Structures are given as structure tokens and as C-alpha cells.
Amino acid sequence: MNEVAKITTAKDWASDQEVRWCPGCGDYAVLKAVQRTMPDLGTAREKTVFISGIGCSSRFPYYMASYGFHTIHGRACAVATGTKLANPELDVWIITGDGDALSIGGNHTMHLLRRNLDCQLLLFNNEIYGLTKGQYSPTSRIGTRSPSTPFGSVDRPANPCAFALGSGARFVARGIDVHKNLVDVLKAAHAHRGSSFVEIYQNCVVYNDDVFASFTDKGVAAEKQLWLVAGEKMLFAGGSKGLALDMDRHMLKVVEGDSDEVLVHDPRNRAVAHMLAEMPAASFPVALGVLYEDPAPTFDSAVLVQNEAASKGKTADLQALVSKGQTWMVEKEPRPE
Amino acid sequence: MATATHLTTEKEARAHPPLEAVVVRFAGDSGDGMQLTGGQFTLSTALAGNDLATFPDFPAEIRAPQGTTFGVSAFQINFGSSAIDTAGDQPDVLVAMNPAALKMNATALREGGLIIADEGEFTPRNLAKAGYDANPLEDGSLAKWQLVHFNISQLTLDAVKPFGLGNKEALRCKNMWTLGLALWMFDRDRQPIVDWLNSKFAKKPELAEANIAALNAGHAYGETVEIGAHVHQRHIAPAPAEPGLYRTVTGAESLSLGIIAGAQLAGLPMFFGSYPITPASPILHHLSRLKEYDITTFQAEDEIAAICAALGASYAGHLGVTSSSGPGIALKGEAMGLAVMTELPLVIINSQRGGPSTGLPTKTEQSDLYQAVYGRNGDAPLPVIAARSPADAFDCGIEAVRIATRYMTPVMLLTDGYIANAAEPWKVPDMANYKPFPVKFAEGSALEPDNDEVMPYQRNADLARPWIKPGTPGLEHRIGGIEKNPGTGNIDYSAEAHAEMTRLRAAKVASVADSICDQGVCIGNDSGKLAVVGWGSTFGPIHQAVRRARARGLDVSHIHIRYIAPFPKNLAVLLKGFERIIVPEMNSGQLKTLLRDQFLVDARPVNKVSGQPFTIAEIETAIEGALA
């Protein structure tokens, strides 16, 4: 990222491959948002790598005109770790879904976040398995009827942002596939050094249509969406409602009107971030934007620093290396005869 | 083991067993420091110029309950004045630090062999734990062996008394006392051990002094005390060896050095992704200390992440290496398929152990050959090579890197628990004799001349595709696990593309045979009555058994295969020159199956799955049986 990247447009970031998602899929909107974001980041295409796992969303890298690696189910984080450690100059984006990142690849997601590898992780959450034709996913709500749960799912869903915070993520954000603010969320994610975790609510028109309608529909959006801005009050419903702390119960509450009681968003407040991530849907809005950001040293830089420190003053001398340890000389063949 | 460093004369070969060779086994509780004793005795043996082979045999439990039979840890060493190929069939000397160690090891001792026991540990409680009704040191039950016993525990306590250690710490010096006695028995110099103790306990000089005092006391005991007619000092003359610089090396060490050398010869930084597992972890430990060789080591969250990160690093232009044992390799299977599909270089090391499942974590076996050759979904061929000894692992490491980078393919490198832990003398290689094979990353040349299209799957004469590092301007492209177009690499599920890519992937791996040497015969003629065909760590016992059989006039040859997939081109003709073929393996007959499958030869299995290496006698019996 040393040289100045040549000026690009969204079009320069689109590959020549035909996009093959279902018509109306939320993935198209995310793809457009990412392609629109890239020119503003100042990163060159050749320095950019999109790495994905398996699932509908994981086809994403094929459609970007950068480098791309479509790996195997659940392992994008692990592959990305090797790629970034091998070349920290690369701008690494991980594209994953709710099944990929939280079910089969949950372990890698957790460790990527705790290590704080410098990358952007975009988790397309559609609360369903699309590519395998509609089974419920780890984020599906209780009672989700699907081919594998004809009587409704009975297990409790995972909350991606709470998972990320619990794993030690230093940047946790949320966006919506078709919302214009997604570009800003992506820019903030890119600006953050370390693992930037972004959950994107993404509508699956075929297997889980309108699952997020309760807060994305135009009629309810204002009432049910709280867009967080650092240093600004947590207001929603056109400024008529806000979030405040219920000091007796140590949890958030919704208050009417703009008062002093309304919390000011401090992205470094981890405790509040947890509360924002886990607000019950029925009585609270959905927290969107950057819920939490508190930079810490990245894994790749720590590895680099240690590798350099441990090599300092030493030279790679293969002959010396193989000759190490307790050695002895055989001067001449000691065979009698 | 003698591999390549020692020249054996016909006269030596006829000696049965070798003229001057001794097998010593140290056995004690897993907390008694027997592996350390064995390791230091090995060093002193090497410095005395003897050829040697060792066999550390320890329990899977870190500290099993004291005094129990399942907590016994043993270290066997075979050394002599001529070529030594194995750790020895039967010990001549057994040092037993407690009743359990005696119980577990006495039966292995050759008749008339010597037992040295620490009588201080033969208490009623310890005897009961080992399952003895009466004290075997006193009841005459050990009559077929020579027995000497004295109170090593008390003698050690007396020796270290001046240093004011607690009872427990003082008793920990027992192993050095024993080592001192062993050094006296074989007329060895104590100074290297003294130096080692001083450096090991540099921060705790009182412990260094106490251990040295114990070592000297053990040595003095042999020199001055009338131990009995049985124990006398023996001097084993140095073994014949090519002149040069030598060191001892374990398989884990030499394999680590081999892949470092390979990476350097290829001009690549190395990324080593691994998850701890017995017996593979020592490779991770060795490499993690050597950052100046442009090595990044990554202890991943699991086996899958270890290989995926290694592959991700290969994608970015490093030499990706991952290492594990059978259960971990099983977990890596899907990612190996991705490496096959994306045609990226990757070295996968399997330090095999007894299986299936958790199996025998600390015991050796070579039962992962099917897994290596076939263990992936789809038609997913990859080259497989196998090291036959600690010293051989060095060259195998280099070969694995050469093949992986030249052919843009994952390579499976097989070793096993025995090779990983065993030590042998190694003639330090002259690195000037190794020809570099520098990797050339693709630049503009990967572009199709006519239309500027990037062709990541366009192949060279070896059928290898270009290695294009992200960061290279103008060559942006996408790869993945989905079937692809044979040139552009774009997604292509068509019947033609899949058939063609399947063919190309197989043809590429098959073409590795063009750059490996012909299969040779280790000893014997290149045709005749019987070929004993082996691979991996069975080299030692097969070699010695064939040598002895030939000395008795039997028409038998030893063929040892390093390149298992693809096999060397001349192997078919070579095998067909023999009337009979037997294949000794520490599994239920896996190489045997491959040979039958590929060459339609009547290869007969000789199998052992006890977690222990073959003895020479077992192979000799198989040879006699096959020729009967």
C-alpha cells in the first residue's frame, strides 16, 4: 500500500464474470456497495484479496476484479490468516455467511477475531442455508420451518455481533444489504486496523424472504433502526426516541424524546456494545452502524515484530545450521585391514 | 543406522550378529528421566565413534502414577564397531530403575543378558504395584539372566548430600548416577556430559554440581567397587565411517532441517502451520526457534486451520508447510483437495503413529499409506514420498519442497514416530552439493498474448501452472475449489472441462516420475529369487536381515521405495525380475496393495502392528519362509 493506487471507479472493481445469484438476492446489493466503496479506499486492485468459504455469498470473490480465493466451507478465516501473515501488505477481505462463519467455521471465526488479524470480515446473515436449498442455520430463529426442521427449529440462534464481541473482536458493526449506509460501514471497517467484523442483514428471496422485514420495511425502518454515530446521542424514530441506561436493572431502556438521559455513543464502551448487540427485537430497535471499535495491536504486526526481533543479528547460514550441535570428526576410515 | 555413511565389508556382513555390538535398554518410571539418560548416552556413544541406532519407547501419559507398569518409560540403544541398522532385537543389558521397569522389560532381554537393578526401589509397595508376589531380586526367578543389584537410590543420596537438596530433588539425580555407571561400563569420556549439565543448569549451579557429583559417583562405583564378575568394562571400537564431520540427529530434527534447506534452495520464505500432536510436535518446536531462516510458524486453532493457513500462505507466495500425525491428517483431507484443485505448492508431513482414531499416540506404525495416497474425496492425486531413517529425512524434506514447487502441487511426506524420535549418526551434508531450484513467480507472462486475459491454468512442459502472487499488477484473477476452465481458471462445470482437468491433474502428478531417480536395489542383485520390498522406517531391520540372509547364501535382495506416488518408472521391470516378492510393513499390507494394483505382481504381505518396529529376526524368518 506504499504507492498511490491509480484512481478507479466502481466499474473497475467488477470482474468479467457473470453474476449468478437468484434475481432479487440481497447479495447483489452488497456486491454493488463493495464495488462502490473500493475506489474510495485508495487501495490498488492487485493489493486486494477477497477470500471466501462456501455458500451463496462465498461466490463473491469471482465477481471482484481483484485477487480472489474461493476456499472451502468454513475455512476462509484460516486461509486468510496464512495469506495476510505471508504478505501483510495485502488488503484482505473475508466474505462469509451465517452457516460458514458461525456453524462449520465458528472455530476459525472466533480465533481470527481474538488474534485480531488485520482484515475485514463481512458476514452475510440471511438466517438460512441458501446454497443447500433452505435448511435452517445457526442464526435462524426458534420455530424456523425448513426442509430439515419441518416442525420448526428448536435450538436457540446465535447472535453474530455478540459472538464477535465475546471472541474479543475490536471492531463490530452492522449493516443492511440494501441500505445506503452500508458503504459508510464498509469504509469504517476498512479504516480500522485489526479484524473488522461486519454483520450484514441480507435478504434471501427464495428461502427466507422478508425475514428482516420487521425492521427493514420502509414503514417501520425509522422506528426500528438505530444508526449509531460516535459522539452522538442514540436517537431513533426521527429523534423522538432514544436509548438510556436503566440504572436499577443495569440494562438499556427506550425513552421518549431527546433528553439528557439519552446515551451518547462511545464505540469504546464494550459493556454498552454488548447491550446494543443483544437488544430484544420486540421492544427495542436494531442497533446498526459501528457498535464497537477499540483498536489494539494486530496479529500480523505482532508476528512480524517478533520474527524480526528473533532474527536480529542472526544470519541464515544453512551450512552452519546443519553442522550445529555436538559434532565429531572422522579423520580417516578406521577400518582395520 | 548406517544409511550411506558407513561402508560395510563382506566380512562384517557375514558376522551374525555383528562382531562388536551391544544393546542396552534403560527402563524406569516416566519421572525417572530415562529418555534424558538415553539421549546423553547416545551422544557419548556417537562421540566415541560407534555406529548406533536408538529406540525411545515411552507411555502416552505424561506422568502415569509412580511405580506402575503402564508408567514405564524405556530407551534402547544399539551400538557397535560395524554398521548398525536397528535399535537391536534383544537387549544385552537392562538397567531397571524399579520393579515395574523390570517386569515390563526383562522378558525382552537375551538369555544370559545382564540386569542392573536399583534395589532401593524394590520395596514391598513398589513390588505390589508391579504385580510381584515376591522380590524377584531374591527369589531366583531371574536365574536365566545375570543379575546385579545395589541401592542406586541410596548411593545417589549419599553422593549429592553436600549440595543440600531436598530428598525428592536429590533422588532426581539417580539417572545421572546410572549414566555414570554406564559410561564406565563402556569406557566413555564423561566430559561432554559434564559440559551439557553445566549448560543445562547454568542458572542453578547447585543442581549442575549435584548431577555431576552423581554422574561421577556412578562412574567411580564401577571403577572401584567389586560389583560382581558380570560387570566389566568393555571398549567398543569406532565403527567404520566415511571421513567427515558427524553429528547425531533425530528424524524430527533432520526433517525440519530438510524443509528449511528446501525452502532456501527454492529461494522462498516458509510458512509452517501446525497444531500440536504426538509425535509430530517436535518439528514445530524446532522450526519455531529459527526465524532467521525466514520462517513464520503458526500454531493454529486446529488441524484444519493449520493446513488452510499454510495454503493461504502458499497462495501469497510462501512455501506453505503443515505437519501432523494420522488423526490430524484426516482432518486436513478437504484442504488437501483444495490444494490439489487450486494447484498450489504445499508440503504435508505425516509423522505416523498407531491408529485408527487416537490409536497408539506414542507408538510407531506405517498404517497411513492408504490415507496418503487415496485419502481425499474425488480424484485427487498428489505425490507421496517416505523417509526411511532420521538421516534420510533431510533429503526427503528437500525433495518434498522441490516437487511441490516445480509441479505446483501438494506433496505428502511420510515419516513415523520411530524415525521422529530415534537418533542416529549423520554425516553433515555439504550444502554446496545441493543444487538450488529457485522459484520464478509469474509476471506479465501469464497473460494470453492476444487478448490480455490472465491464464492462471496455462501449463508449462511439466504441466505445472504459473504461481501468481497476489500483489502482482495486471494478473488479478480468482481461484477456488470449484471445477474450472483449463486455461482461464474461471468456473466451468462442463463435462469437457472436468474430464480435461481431472486428466491434467493426474498427468501432472504422474509426470513427477520424470524428475526422480530410478529405483535402485539396496543390497543384492537386481533380479533373482526373492525381493524384500519396504518403505519408511522398516529400512533398518530389512537391510540387516537381507544382509544376513545373503551371507548365508540365500538369493534375496532389498528394495526400499522412497517415491510411492508416483512410483519410479523402472519399478515395474525391477519387480518383475524377481520370482517372489515379500513386503514387510508395520500395517496390514498397504504397500503390498499398491504394488499389486499398479504392477499386477504377487507381492506377499509380512505385517506387524504391535506399535514396535520389526526385529531383524522377524524379517529373517519371513525371508526363510518365502524361500522355502
Image (cartoon, helix red, strand yellow):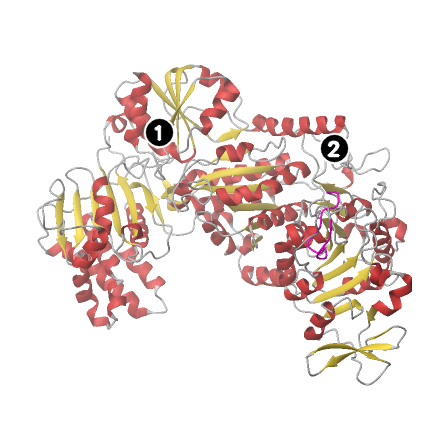
Residue found 8% across the figure and 46% down from its top: B229
Above-or-below relation of A26 to B491:
below
User: How many neighbours does mark 1 have within 10 angstroms: few (below 14), some (14-19), or many (20 or more)?
Assistant: many
Q: Amino acid at mark 1?
A: Ile
Quarter placement of the N terminus of chain A: bottom right
| A144 sits to left or right of B21 | right
Residue B465 on the magenta span: no
| A26 sits to left or right of B178 | right
User: How many neighbours does mark 2 have within 10 angstroms: few (below 14), some (14-19), or many (20 or more)?
Assistant: some
Quarter placement of the C terminus of chain A: top left
Q: Position of residue A182 (x, y in %)?
A: 84, 61
Decide: marks 2, 1 in contact (CB < 8 A)?
Answer: no
- The dot on residue B458 is 2
Disc 2 and disc 1 on one polypeptide chain: yes
The quadrant in which residue A264 appears is bottom right
Element class at badge 2: loop
* Circle 1 residue: B542
The quadrant in which residue B264 appears is top right
Question: Chain for mark 2?
Answer: B
Pick the front one: A48 or A238 = A238
Calculate the distance from the C-alpha at mark 2 to the C-alpha at mark 1. 45 Å
Residue found 33% across the figure and 42% down from its top: A330
Does residue B506 appear in the picture of this structure?
A: yes
Q: Which badge, 2 or 1, comes first in the chain's sequence?
A: 2
Q: Amino acid at mark 2?
A: Gln
Pick the front one: B585 or A308 = B585
Q: Position of residue B150 (x, y in %)?
A: 13, 56
Element class at badge 1: helix
Residue found 70% across the figure and 49% down from its top: A151
Q: Which residues are magenta?
A: A132-145
- The dot on residue B358 is none
Q: Position of residue B47 (x, y in %)?
A: 30, 48
